[in-house]
Amino acid sequence: MKKITMLTGLMAGAAMLISQASLAMSDCGEIIIGSAISLTGKYATNGVHAQKGYEYGITKIKENGGVMVDGKCYNFKVVYYDDESKGDRAATLAERLISQDKVQYMLGPYSSGMTKAIAPVTEKYKIPMVEAEGASRSLFNKGYKYIFAVLSTSEQYLASAIALAAEKAEASGKSASSVTVAIAVENDPFSLDVRAGVLDDAKSFGMKVVIDEKLPRDLSDMSAILTKVKLLKPDVLVVSGHSKGAATAVRQIGEQNIKVPMIAITHCEAADVTGKFGDAANDFLCSTQWSETLAYEDPIFGTAAEYEMGFKSEYPEYKSKKVPYQTAQATAAVYVFKDAFERANSMDKEKVRDALSATDLSTFYGHIKFSEAGNNIAKPMVLRQIQDGKYNVVAPSEFASHKLNWPRM
Amino acid sequence: MDQILGNLSLLVEFPIVNLKIIIDGVMIGALFVLVAYGLALVWGVMNVKNLAQGDFVISGGYVSWWLVEQGFPALLGVPVAFIVMWGIGWVIYKLVISRVIERDLFTSLLATFGLAIMMAQILNLLFGSDTQSVDLGYETLFFADGLITIPIAKLIGVLMAATLAAAVIIFMKSSRMGQAIRATAQDARAARVMGIDTEKVYAFTFSLNSAICGAAGAIIVMVWLIQPFYGISYSIRAFVVVTAAGLGNLPGVIAAGLGIGALEQFGAHIFGIGYQQAIAVLLLLLVLIFRLIQQRRQRQVLK
C-alpha cells in the first residue's frame, strides 16, 4: 500500500513538474476545483443546470484572460463526480475529491440537502467551498468558516409575498393583521425554511395562519388541502415543494377553480408551469433568486440580459426556455472564486478563504457580500408574477417592471 | 391537535365536503384497483410478489407522455401504453421473472426490488427527473356551490379504468387463456398434467399485469403527475389493497382499492396531507393484525 502511495506521489510530482514546465511555454496554468453534483437521481435536472452554469462561467473567464494570480494566468478546471442525488454519496465523494484527487477548492453541489452533507467534510479539511445551490439557513448557523453561498437564504424565498399582501390589504382599506395565510410546504430542509420565513413575517404583521400543512415527498395530489382552502378562504396561499409542488399546485388550483387573491410558489421555471398548464398559471407569484430583466452587470458576463443571451448561444438547448436562476448562480460562484484568487494573489487556500470572506463584488447575478456565516447578504429575492404567460418582476418595488395583478383572476 | 380538531369541525360544518372527499378518493382508488388487480394476478398465478409494480405504472405513464410530446392525442396514450408495456412485460418475464418463479419468496422479492430500482433509474436517464404530466385541457364540472369539483379529465380516466377492469374480468371468465390462467393459479402441477402450457400462461399473465399497469400509468399522467421515482407509492398501495382483499377476490380488491382511496383522503384532510401515505401503511398494519387474529380463531396455520 505504502509503495503505491509513494508511486502516485512521485507520479503526481512528475505531473506537476510537467505542468509547471508547460506553464512556462503555453499561456495559462490550471486551478483544479472539485465538485460532487447531482447528474443522476431526483435532483438531476437542476444539477445539470448548475453544472452548465459552472462550465459557462469557466469558459467566459477563460475568454476574458483567465484568472491572474501573482502575474501568471490560470484557468479553472472542475473535477465532477455524480452524487446520484444522495447525501451520503455526496459526502463520500467530497472526501474522495479532497483526499484522493487532492483538490484544494470546491464548488457546491445542488440542493441544500447535498450541501449540508458536504459542508462538514470541507470544514474538516479546511477546504474553501463556494456554493450556489444550497439556500437552507441551517447551513449558516453551524459556525462553518469555509462555506460561502452566493444566493439568498431560503427563508427569504416567499417572505416578500407576505409583505406584498400586507401592502395590498392596507391599500384596500383593511389592516394588515386581517390578512389570513395558508401554507403548504414539503417536509424538507429547504421548504421548511421557506415556511419559517413566511411564518416569521406573518407573525410580525399579526396575520393569522389558517392552514399550515406539510406536503409528502411523493406528492401528486393536494386536493385535501385545496378543499380546506376553499372553505377557509385565506388571502394568501404559499406553496413550496420543488418542481412537483409547483406543478401540482398550478394544475389542481386551476382544475378546482380555487380563488385566492394571492398565490405564491417556488420553482415555477423548473416546473415549466407556463409551458405545461398555460392560462392556469396566470397571476401566480413566483419567487426567484435572479431574473434576466434585472439591472445587474459586471465586466465579464455583461448585464443579466447579456448573460442570458450568451448562455443560450453556448447551450442552444436552452433557446426556447428561460435560463434558470440555478444556472446563473452557479456561474456567479465561479466568478466569486476568480475574484477571490486575484485578490488573494496566492494559491494558498487559507489566503483564498480570507479573500472569499472579504468579497464585495458586483455581478450580473446581483451584488455579493458574505456575512460572517458565509451567506450572501447583499442580494434580495425577487418576486415575479406570471402575466399572460410571461414572468414579470412585481416586487420588491425598486426592481418592479410591472404592476401586480391583484386580486388574481 | 388544534388543527386536527379544526379539520374535523370543518367536516361537520360543511357536510358536503365529506362527499367531495369520497369522490376524490374513489377516483384515485379506481387506479389503485387496477394496479392491485394486476399484482394479485401475478401473485396468485405464479407466486411472485412484484415490488416493481409501481414502476410499471410510471413506465406506462412515460410512454403516454412521450407520445403526447410527439404530437399524438392524449387519449391514444392509454391503449398504446397497454401494448408497449405488454411487450416490455414479456421481455422482463423472459429475462428475469421466469428464472425466479420456482425459487423461494426472497429470490423473487429481491429480483423485483432490483428491477424496481433499475426501471426508475432508466426512466430517470431517459426522461430526466422532472415531474411530467399531460394536460387534456378539458373543463371541470362544479356542483354544490363549486365545492365539489369533478375535472372531466379525471372522469374520463376513471371510466377508462372501469372499462379496462371490466374487459379483463370478462377475459378471465370466458376466454380459453383466462381459464388456463385460473387453472394454473389453482394448481400449477395439475394444470400441467391437463396439458396446459404453464410457461406460456406465466408469460401471458406477467405481460397482462404489466400492460394493465401501463394503462393505469397512462391514465395517471393525464390526471395527476408522474416522476421516475414515484413508482414506490403505487407499489405500496397495491400491496395494501391485495393484502386487505386477499388473492383471487376481485370484489374485495375493488372494495379495498376504492376504500383505501377514500380513507386516505379523509386521513389527509384530518391529519394533514403529509400523513396520506402513512395512513395507507397504517391500514395495512391493521389489516394484518386483524387477519392474524381471525386466523388464530379459526385455528388455521399460516403457510
Image (cartoon, grey):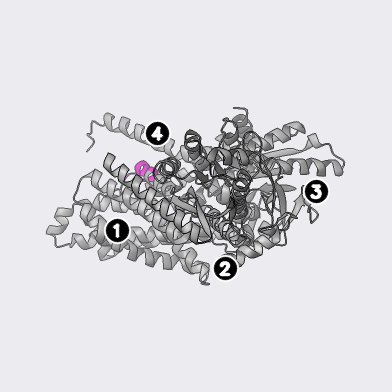
Residue B127, placed above or below residue A136: below
Residue on which disc 4 sits: B286
Q: Can residue A260 be seen by looking at this rendering?
A: no
Task: Say which amino acid is labelled 4.
Answer: Leu
Task: Say which amino acid is labelled 1.
Answer: Phe
Residue on which disc 1 sits: B206
Task: Say which amino acid is labelled 3.
Answer: Ser
Magenta-highlighted stretch: main secondary structure? helix
Asked whether the residues under the numbered discs 1 and 4 touch, taking CB atoms below 8 Å apart as contact, a structural biologist would say no
Tell me, yes or no, whether dots 4 and 3 are on the same chain.
no
Label 1, secondary structure: give it. Answer: helix
Q: Chain of mark 4?
A: B
In this image, B85 relative to B133: left or right? left
What is the distance, in whole Å, between disc 1 and disc 3 at their CAs? 60 Å
Q: Can residue A238 be seen by looking at this rendering?
A: yes
Label disc, if present, on residue A397 of the rendered structure: 3
Label 2, secondary structure: give it. Answer: helix
The span picked out in magenta is: B240-246
Instruction: Please state which of the two labelled residues, at mark 1 or mark 2, is closer to the viewer.
Output: 2
Q: Earlier in the sequence, mark 1 or mark 4?
A: 1
Residue B28 x %, y %: 50, 50
Instruction: Please state which of the two labelled residues, at mark 1 or mark 3, is closer to the viewer.
Output: 3
Q: Chain of mark 3?
A: A
Residue on which disc 2 sits: A316
